[in-house]
Amino acid sequence: ASVLADYVAEQSASGTYDFEANKALLKIYQCVPDLANLDVIVKLLALSLMRLPRTDFLALWFMLPGKAAINAKDPKLKLVGRCGELLQSGKFAQFWEEYKESPLSGEIFGATGFEKAIRVFMVENIRNVYANINKQGLQEMLGFGSAANEFQTFCENNHSIGAVSDSIEFVSCPENCKGPAKKEKSLGFEEMLRLVDSIKGQ
């Protein structure tokens, strides 16, 4: 267990991730609850949030050993659980509030690349709903606050974001261009006339 626990710390420091190893550690904790280390567990769960929209977080959350369940009121476990709930329900503004206001965030969510991974997940979700969005609104939604330069750099390096001006244009995807897809399937006026003529001729 200690080797796998050290591996969680290594993943956090390097920004890597190993779902199978982390799942194996929780299985050990399930079998021997006295070995369960809540600090390791919350870091492990935080790493899984970086892989959203994959379901790793839920899978690992439901594997929490008896000791962790008993200590469910632990502030660190409550925070990571709350943040996971907000992210998966699309309440991004509330996530950033919880994340930035808690003094525990740095300790729990200190994995290399955490904020970037969360923002990439958010952009993909927003892109699936909107073809474009107000620039200031997206900046706030992604938790950049007044850091306009950081936001600009993020947009320039994100493959889902196209043109950036007063509004943000997302790169088209099946989810955000349902309207045009429907228009392509509709009959044009000339086609309709030909259809009517063919029916009359029958």
Image (tube, rainbow, N blue to C red):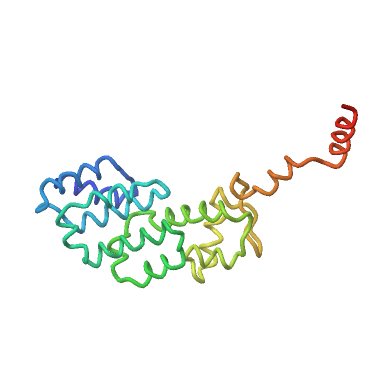
Q: How many marks?
A: 0
Which quadrant of the view contains residue 102?
A: bottom left
Q: Which residue is nearer to you in this view: 39 or 182?
A: 182
Q: In the picture provided, is 194 more to the left or to the right than 52?
A: right
User: Is 137 positioned to the left or the right of 61 in the image?
Assistant: right
Picture quadrant of residue 181: top right
Residue at 63%, 54% in the rendered image: 131
Residue 130: x %, y % from top left? 60, 56
Q: Please state if 45 lies on the left or on the right of 201 as rendered.
A: left
- Where's residue 180, x and y in %? 70, 46
Residue 125, horizontal then vertical, whole percent: 51, 53
Residue at 21% over, 66% down: 74
Task: Looking at this view, name the residue that lies furthest to the top.
Answer: 202
Residue, x 36% and y 58% (percent of image)?
Answer: 84
User: Observer-nearest residue: 20 or 112?
Assistant: 20
- Kindly identify the residue that appears in the image at 14 percent across and 57 percent down: 67
Q: Is residue 32 above or below residue 191?
A: below
Q: Nearer the viewer, residue 173 or 66?
A: 66
Compared with 193, 94 (above or below) is below
The quarter of the image holding the N terminus is top left
Quadrant where the image shows the C terminus: top right
Relative to 188, is 48 above or below?
Answer: below
